[in-house]
Image (cartoon, grey):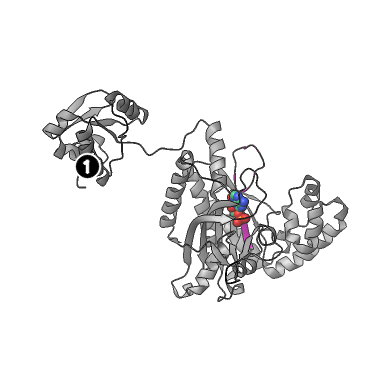
Amino acid sequence: MHDILPKDEKYWKPMYKTISDLAEHFQFSRIETPILEEVGVFVRGIGKGTDVVDKEMYVFEDKDTTKVAMRPEMTAAVVRAYIMHGFWNMPQPTKLWYWGPMFRHDRPQAGRYRQFHQIGFENFGSNDPSVDAELILVAFDFFKDLGLPVEIKINSIGTLAERANYKNELVNYYRSKRSYLCEECRQRITKNPMRLLDCKETGCQTVKEEAPQIINWLGAESKNHFMKVLEYLDVLEIPYQLDHTLVRGLNYYTNTVFEIYTTDEQEGSQSALGGGGRYDLLVEEMGGRPTPAAGLAIGLERVVLALKQYNEKNNREMPKVPTDAYVAQLGEEARRVTMKIINQLRGVGIKIAFNFFKTSLKNQMELADGLKAPFTVIIGQKEVQDSTAIIRDMESGIQEIVDQKKLVTVLKRKLGRFDDKR
Ligand code: AMP
């Protein structure tokens, strides 16, 4: 588990802004669910045999002996909420988004934490391929707005019936290659054969490459759905790669599955920034009415790591919120006036900076320079007495004395980005 430090705020803040803008644009409403849920929500939702449920979940007994889990992901919890609050009575599709900490007792390594943050989008009530494409578009736009180049890896894992037939073939194939497999894959043959395709061990790669491909087991409807999703991605000019080994770690997926990777060549093992897919059976499995649905989740710590590497290599900085004006004060009385002025300026949306610990004008001008503030407002003894303020243009050095009452109006005009009617 880790602290998120102020030095990284420049990454977290734009992520939050981007995601909330996207949610508004694509009409997703925010949902928050508790960190603790009754353990069954995740066991039923994610499924036994998955790493998340079998190995990584924080589970303990509450004081009343209820077995609770700290959420390892949110889709199962959102589905629980969808059913519990009768969301199907709302106009469909129901579109929800979330942001919050998740907990997995994972093996710690770069980009892998035991408490990490995910954002996610879920869409309930439609099995139209446009829903899958829209989710991928939201993810793609999230990275585009942050300035990180990404591509999508995509596959279809079909319906349950199609997958069952495929699994038989896969198990037969892997049994014949048993001697080449790592210990974990040998166990997966009986425990969770789809995860055989997910193995990262070098020894298992050749076996994996030659494994039967699920696409050949898909029926006409599943194939058609998949083709339509791809057509939408073509129209949207979203770069994607078909990947027949992509199955995702959670059991609830049907048909479309996808993951998002940066196309920037990064150090260390390249892991997915996010992923998602369709889960048409999950609502019913968890006790609701049959409701097709699809969703995606993005791991924010991974995004920060990827952005840091990308920015460093490309000499790029995260865009900063610019400071409009630095407000400098000289003396006790000036500080009192300044306190009022900074609040007035904030009230009209002028972004200001100040520091009451600095008492010399020189120090404060240095701070203003460092922030690249275009203007400094100076309040000294004389300005307190005359009810005036000095506005200094930091580039030209030209100073203007204005009445304190007119300060807001004059500064707004000088900044030139305010609608006069405000
Ligand atoms: P999943 O819910 O397993 O599909 O994961 C979705 C995304 O969450 C991944 O692509 C990662 O970006 C992120 N993620 C999953 N597990 C961790 C972890 N232990 N630490 C940091 N990020 C994680």
Q: Is residue 377 magenta?
A: no
Kind of element beneath mark 1: helix
Quadrant housing residue 160: bottom right
Nearer to me, 334 or 376: 334
Q: Residue furthest left?
A: 386
Nearer to me, 175 or 225: 175
Identify the residue under disc 1: 340
Quadrant housing residue 47: bottom right
Q: Which amino acid, by three-letter code, is at mark 1? A: Lys
Nearer to me, 153 or 329: 329
| Label 1 within 8 A of ligand 1 by Cβ | no
**Residue 368 % position (x, y):** 32, 29
Residue visible at 56% across and 57% down in the picture: 296
Residue range in magenta is 255-272
Q: Is residue 269 magenta?
A: yes
Is residue 7 positioned above or below 100 on the image? Answer: above
Residue visible at 26% across and 23% down in the picture: 396
Is residue 225 positioned above or below 148 on the image? Answer: below
**Is residue 183 visible from the viewing direction of this image?**
yes
Residue visible at 36% across and 31% down in the picture: 371
Residue visible at 20% across and 40% down in the picture: 408
Query: Is 349 placed left or right of 215 in the picture?
Result: left
Query: Is 158 placed left or right of 175 in the picture?
Result: left
Total of numbered circles in the picture?
A: 1
How packed mark 1 is, by other alpha carbons closer than 10 Å (few <14, some 14-19, many 20 or more), is few
**Residue 209 % position (x, y):** 77, 50
**Is residue 280 visible from the viewing direction of this image?**
no
Query: Is 190 placed left or right of 333 in the picture?
Result: right
**Residue 168 % position (x, y):** 79, 65
